[in-house]
């Protein structure tokens, strides 16, 4: 990956950013020497306990906007789009990070249609619907950018995937056999590949990133901290260039097989 001289973007939206990796990414962008003019964080419940930290950040960072968003509901996506449009205007949205995700702890014996459809709806269809809705704003950002080649400073869709969705390496299979999650992330990887073939005509790059195994309610034995993961992701994003479009990498920029 080409070394970027600096990293500066006009605006960024991170879905599922009231905790974990999403919240970490929001913090990393706010802490940049040249932070975005607009950072949009989203949460399912604006009044929920998990939104407390985001609300505290809003008091400190005037460029942070917290939005209610359910990526499975078109009306919720449209409402968020309208709010983002009011802020960014003709400058558009530089980066869309599709981070919102969920899982069900089901193996091959216990997996069922209801749980699998819920996981697929959030992890695969959600990023599709978000990318479709925000495409006009991503196009505007690309059109106004002085960058000639694809880059995250121009316009980008970043899909937070997982090595668990890699058909070749099947990450974490020994620890968690979460069938619906694995299938949904594999499908998200295919969506990323499709976007990487379609969106460059509009100046937009697309990649999938595996953030590593971080601590959450179901994972008490993480590889890395949220801070390590999100700082790594930010470094990767700052170095992406045209040849990286359509790739699947981890938080350190190392390629992962599809």
Image (tube, rainbow, N blue to C red):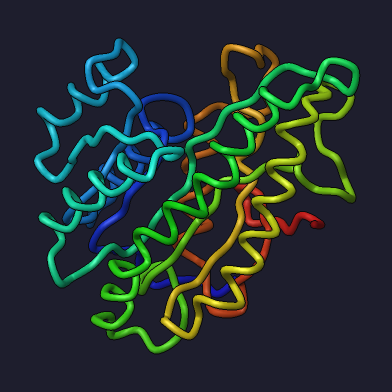
Foreground of the two, 199 or 76: 76
> x, y percentage for residue 124?
60, 46
Foreground of the two, 62 or 42: 42
> x, y percentage for residue 41?
29, 38
What is the tally of numbered marks visible in this picture? 0
Q: Which of the 4 image quadrants contains residue 1?
A: bottom right
> x, y percentage for residue 245?
59, 72
Q: Farthest residue toward the bottom? A: 148
Residue depicted at x 43% and y 35%:
22
Tell me if 5 is positioned left or right of 164 in this view: left
> x, y percentage for residue 248?
68, 58
Tell me if 122 is positioned left or right of 186 in this view: left
Residue depicted at x 50% and y 49%:
127
Tell me if 129 is positioned left or right of 221 in this view: left
Residue depicted at x 61% and y 61%:
192
* Vertical placement of residue 224 versus 138, above or below: above
* Vertical placement of residue 55 versus 156, above or below: above
* Vertical placement of residue 105 versus 202, above or below: above
* Vertical placement of residue 141 versus 202, above or below: above
Q: Quadrant of the C terminus?
A: bottom right
Foreground of the two, 59 or 76: 76
Q: Which of the 4 image quadrants contains residue 190?
A: bottom right
Q: Which of the 4 image quadrants contains residue 51?
A: top left
Residue depicted at x 51% and y 54%:
128
Tell me if 224 is positioned left or right of 135 in this view: right
């Amino acid at each position: 990956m080409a070394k970027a001289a600096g990293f500066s973007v006009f605006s960024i939206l991170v879905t599922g950013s009231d905790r974990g990796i999403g919240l970490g990414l929001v913090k990393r962008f706010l802490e940049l020497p040249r932070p975005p003019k607009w950072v949009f964080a989203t949460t399912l419940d604006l009044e929920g306990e998990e939104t407390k930290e985001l609300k505290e950040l809003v008091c400190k960072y005037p460029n942070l906007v917290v939005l209610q968003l359910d990526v499975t509901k078109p009306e919720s996506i449209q409402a968020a789009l309208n709010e983002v449009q009011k802020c960014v205007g003709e400058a558009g949205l530089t980066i869309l990070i599709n981070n919102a995700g969920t899982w069900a702890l089901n193996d091959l014996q216990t997996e069922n249609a209801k749980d699998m459809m819920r996981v697929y709806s959030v992890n695969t269809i959600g990023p599709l619907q978000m990318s479709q809705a925000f495409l006009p704003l991503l196009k505007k950002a690309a059109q106004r950018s002085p960058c000639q080649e694809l880059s995250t400073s121009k316009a980008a869709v970043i899909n937070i995937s997982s090595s668990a969705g890699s058909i070749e390496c099947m990450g974490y299979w020994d620890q968690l056999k979460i069938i619906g999650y694995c299938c949904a992330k594999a499908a998200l990887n295919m969506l990323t590949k499709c976007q990487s073939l379609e969106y460059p005509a509009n100046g937009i790059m697309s990649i999938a990133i595996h953030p590593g195994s971080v601590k959450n309610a179901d994972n008490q034995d993480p590889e890395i901290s949220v801070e390590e993961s999100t700082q790594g992701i930010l470094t990767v994003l700052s170095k992406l260039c045209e040849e990286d479009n359509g790739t699947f990498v981890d938080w350190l920029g190392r390629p992962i097989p599809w």
